[in-house]
Image (cartoon, rainbow, N blue to C red):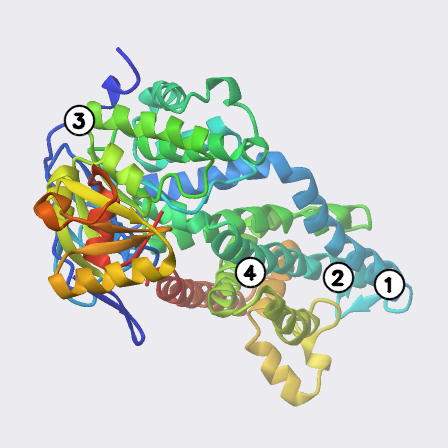
Amino acid sequence: MTAFEQTVAEPTRRDPRRVRRLEPAALGGVMMRDVVLFRRYWKATTFSSIVQPTIYLLAFGLGFGSLVKTVGHVKYAEFVATGVVATAVLFSSAFPGMFNTFIRWKFQRTYDALLAAPVDVEELVTAEIIWISVRAGVYGMAPLVVGFFFGLKPTAGMLLVPFIGFVTGFGFAAFGVLIAAVAKTIDNFNYITSAVLTPMFLVAGTFFPISSLPPVLHTIAKFNPLYHCVALVRDVSLAIYDSADLVHAAVLVGFGVAMWRLAVWRMQAGLID
Amino acid sequence: MVKRFGQITAVDGLDLVVPHGVCFGLLGPNGAGKSTTMRMLTAQTLADEGTLEVLGYSLPRESKQARMAMGVVPQLDNLDVELTTRQILDVFAHLYRVPRAERPDAVERALDIANLRPRADTIVRDLSGGMRRRLLVARGLIHRPQMVLLDEPTVGLDPQVRQELWSLIDGLRAAGVTVLMSTHYIEEAERLADTVAVMSAGKIIAQGTPSQLVSSHAGSEVLEVYGPPAELAQLEALATERGWPYRRSGPAVALLEAERLNGEAPEGVRRPANLEDAFVALTGQEIE
């Protein structure tokens, strides 16, 4: 039998199976592609995702660490190591969300190919965001591992950090996809990087407590999702739990859900004429 | 169906039924609305007016079910250039819900269809243009679709690769797969399509087998009259006056339905009418 004869179509019939939203097969198919690509480029991706926050950690931990010994009751090295987790998560989620999405959509036309298969925009966007978030959750552990060499003590609570990184990464990956959906050119990302992401990680309580900020910035910082990631990671890592951690977690989940729906909405408008 | 993009109406009252098991050609010049029509069939473009049913599924509501039973070969190369041939086929076997146990066989079959087995583990960016086009076809066939959409399948390819793809499409047709193919190559439509719909300005302006279209719109014979521009201009004026259908064909005026001219026919070269004659008669436009 030839390959063509094996291709003979069966008679037209309706598929009795109801198609659900967010089908695992569609999500898995899109992520499978991401995994195959990751296996090829994991070294470069991992290097850039780990090295940058590690440099911050070294610079602030060693630099300021010689001037500032503690923040409250927390050693400065521990303060920064736990704080930089959020930076690692931000960098490994928002940037791939923006750049990968834009390149695959506008330059490589990958999304056109995927949407011609039985995948809808919601599944496509969700799968991309989940994959980036998984990576962000894993890469978020890197500063803690580096921190161990600077005296950070391992705790059971640190096992929650990848999950916090995943939830935070989900929100920022979705934010990146949203920006890619509305950006006219890839150069527009410079505005977001300079005007949104950089200030965001500087006023997140990563390197100094937000309580030391002027009152206006202090209030603004509380609306910064990255601050809630920093606070939650620090609390679980250093075992200083309090009821505010529930608020931090709720903010991160809310931010993730809101960004996800906005990203799906704008990508739907961009990908479907 | 109607589809507008701002002030432009890309598809303007298109009404089309594609029978099961035929190769159906949408023939038209660039900008006729063919690609928009193709995208509407995958719900990547939504119609502003009208209803659309594909393989018994109502679009866009049931577009996902329809896409499960349909293969798509796009006009523009949208392959993942960083994956290998086999990896691309594997990803799409997954996306098209080919059961896990059947995926290896599906990938091997697709490699055979595209004659790409020796390049199965080559990264796509290292494949030639023809190989990439064949891979696009194989990707669209990985799940044994009931229907295949081919959007300008051979555009921009050299003649040898075009012949290879024609053989591939011929094989699909012979295997009973419904093929809906858009093209602006008349020879391609004539050679491959059982039925051709001529599209112009978003509308179907004629439809039939290639021979029906030729006989209905260009007759059985064409008389090509060669001469200096002034003589040709006189002949065009005469043809207009007498109501003879004609078209300018390079350095000649081609009088259509020449079998009806009898004794009035000027000196010239008679040849059988073809689909290009019918197409120009219908649209007033020359295409490749």
Residue on which disc 2 sits = A80
Residue A171: horizontal and vertical position, in percent? Answer: 49, 62
Q: Mark 1 highlights which residue?
A: A65
Q: What residue is drawn where x is 46% and y is 22%?
A: B116
Q: How many marks?
A: 4
Q: Which residue is mark 4?
A: A98
Q: Secondary structure at mark 2?
A: helix
Residue furthest out toward the right:
A66
Residue B46 in sight: no
Q: Amino acid at mark 2?
A: Val
Foreground mark, 3 or 1?
3
Say whether marks 1 and 2 touch (CB < 8 Å).
yes
Give SS at disc 4: helix
As measured in the structure, the alpha-carbon distance from the residue carrying label 3 to the one carrying label 4 is 44 Å
The first of marks 2 and 4 along the sequence is 2
- Left or right: residue A139 compared with residue A273: right
